[in-house]
Amino acid sequence: MDYNKLYIDGEWIKPDSQEQIEVENPANREIIAKIPSSNKNDVDKAVNAAKRAFETWQYEDLNKRIELVEKLRDEMINKKEDMASIIMDELGRSKSFALNPQVEPYIDAMSDFIDIVKNYEFERNKDGYKVRKEPFGVVAAITPWNYPLGQIIKKIIPALLVGNTIVLKPSQKTPLVAYTLAECFDKVGFPKGVFNLVTGAGSKVGKMLTEHKDVDVVSFTGSVEGGKKVGENSIKGIKKVTLELGGKSPAILLKGGDYELGIKKALNTVYNNTGQTCSAFTRLLVPEDEKEIIEKMVVEKTKKYKFGNPYSEEKIVGPLASKKQFDKVKSYIEKGLDEGAKMIYGEIPKDSSKGYYVGPVVFTDVTNDMKIARDEIFGPVISIITYKDKEDAIKIANDTTFGLAGAVFGPEIEAKEVANKIKAGTITINQGSPTHKAPFGGYKHSGIGREGGVAGFEAFLQEKAIFS
């Protein structure tokens, strides 16, 4: 694969920019590739190609669009092992974790999206008028490093199926799997300009896209600060914008509930992607009179997770994604101790010279006003916070600037009652399991708009009222 090219207007082309960005393997700090740092000319070419393609793609028969996406899905199935290997290298995942949750669930989600669009009503007759849903035009998809394939799929597939065209800018930290995806687009034979790939830093290339006069929609996943900048730039151009941002999600263990289940599900979200999941249940809310019992259970279960070199075993939790992440997570572990929290498992990471490895950390005696309870750490760090009664648990759960996700584990009726009172976009109750058929997004500072489900399609559609 020649990573020193961009995919624009149906061709792999040499970039106008001569600048490059190094891509590092976080497991061993080796430079595995160099990609273009696209400039304004490169971005203009991509947007112009997408704009031209939209003139015909918006009117393409839906069945034809579905057929092309089905072929794309099938080609991705053929390439899933290759994509998993790339994610192993650029994100530091072990083989098992690279395949699931990084690759296979999102290929499966493409079938869900196809089913949704097949049954979607693009026109609805009302009393004296008709409502018609139409695509916007050019969509700029700006995606993060923590799920480098999945976040692309959740944006571009619904957008394409309803008739928009795409300019994709993946994270400069994990851009390589997007090149394999572009190869799949090329092989399948999408019309020229329907899908375009530019690479570079979000602060530079992402900014160009959000400010570009011919970009109609911006779909961004990333940090709250990044989202604010994207939102500001997009609104200046009166663009439709969707923001999927951070979280500090609570998991509430109610008395009488299945603590084993709740702790296992919470720890899976916090540990399995090395804590680099925006919806991770990083605040574990527990009854104050059962704190010691739950602490022991959390520690015993934490010991069963294997952390280390992702190439050493099929299923092992690998490193953080970058030096920046390593330093950030280390600083928060230190802050937790400084604030008076008690570390009952784990240690302060010391050396990142051979890779950005941080093991699991369990804090207890955490109060909800501590930095480790309020800020998104984005590492394998969980905080145990006690509550007095059900009302106190709900109050603590909602005492956050975020509102992306949450979970409740307890007697079914009581758990549903508590779930309804948590201000977050996604709530898991007991054995419940999230699906891409459902909408995903946050309240408060966790974002604007939704991805997944019918709502994920409507993010890329605008309404027209027709009177006749």
Image (cartoon, rainbow, N blue to C red):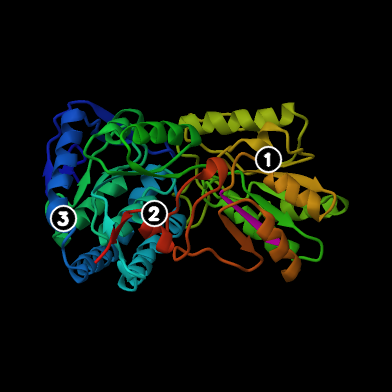
| 266 to the left or right of 98 | right
Q: Which mark is residue 327?
A: none
The amino acid at mark 2 is Gly
Up-down: is 19 above or below 121? above
Percent coordinates x, y for residue 346 in the rendering = 68, 40
Mark 3 vs 2, N-terminal side = 2
Residue sitting at x 37%, y 49%: 87
Q: Quadrant of the C terminus?
A: bottom left
- Residue matched to label 2: 150
- Residue matched to label 1: 346
The stretch of residues the image draws in magenta is 404-409
The amino acid at mark 1 is Gly
Q: Which mark is residue 186?
A: 3
Percent coordinates x, y for residue 219 in the rendering = 36, 45
Q: Decide whether residue 336 is among the magenta residues.
A: no
Residue sitting at x 30%, y 34%: 237
| 200 to the left or right of 247 | left
Which of 403/248 is in front?
403
Cβ atoms under marks 1 and 2 closer than 8 Å: no
